[in-house]
Amino acid sequence: SFRITCCPGVVDPLCSQLVSMGSVRRRARREARERRLKQQADGDQSATGPTNAKISAFECYYRAQGIIPQEEWPQMLRSLRSPLPACLRISPSPFTKQLMERLHAFCSSVDVRSLEWAGNAVQLAVDKGGLKKHTEFQTWLQQHTECGDITRQEAVSMVPALLLEARGGERLL
């Protein structure tokens, strides 16, 4: 951790803002810890495990924000806990068409949906764990990932690159 020091007698709004943000975070952590200990003392089994403790702190924070109506919380938590589908982006090359055909051949038993907004990207109707069951496909995918033909990437992570509209020869940070 670091310490913020200001010149004596000089009021620095940034320093005071950072200090107040830190004290708010410390108070929130202390209050969450006290709630968790109180729940454990009262015999509430849902707060005993570390995962449940994190989830309850998450829930407490976001419920206090009032972003999501109370009746939609169970559905939102189920969505957050569900695994993400596997997404693949195929790099543009003369072999793109053959790679897409081979991908569809491997995934004949799995629904493959094209992400048209992302160019040469597909979304498979299985999660990361489901891909591991198909060893031949896993080997093929690993070979093409290593040589740069295919990239495994979440669909939401493809959006910033599309919004930047990078062109050949440009360097982006």
Image (cartoon, grey):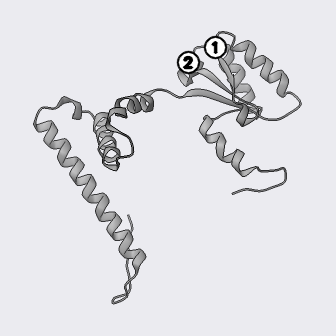
Residue 139 pos. (x, y %):
68, 20
Whether residue 3 appears in this view of the structure is no
Identify the image quadrant of residue 81: top left
Q: Quadrant of the N terminus?
A: bottom left
Secondary structure, mark 2, is helix
Residue 97 pos. (x, y %):
84, 24
Q: CA distance from mark 1 to mark 2?
A: 10 Å
> Is 91 on the left or on the right of 31, as rendered?
right
- Which of discs 1 and 2 lies nearer the camera? The answer is 1
Residue at the image point whose x is 37% and y is 88% from the top: 10
Query: Along the line of sight, which residue is nearer the eye, 1 or 43?
Result: 43
Amino acid type of the residue that numbered disc 2 sits on in the rendered structure: Gly
> Is 119 on the left or on the right of 87, as rendered?
right
Q: Which residue in the structure is indicated by mark 1?
A: 110
Residue at the image point whose x is 39% and y is 45% from the top: 67
Tag of residue 130: 2
Q: Quadrant of the C terminus?
A: bottom right
**First in sequence: mark 1 vs mark 2:** 1
**Which residue appears farthest toward the top when viewing the image?**
109
Residue at the image point whose x is 71% and y is 36% from the top: 118
Q: How many residues crowd mark 2 within 10 Å: few (<14), some (14–19), many (20+)?
A: few
Residue at the image point whose x is 56% and y is 24% from the top: 128
Secondary structure, mark 1, is loop
Amino acid type of the residue that numbered disc 1 sits on in the rendered structure: Val
Query: Along the line of sight, which residue is nearer the eye, 64 or 19?
Result: 64
Whether residue 64 appears in this view of the structure is yes
> Disc 1 vs disc 2: Cβ atoms closer than 8 Å?
yes
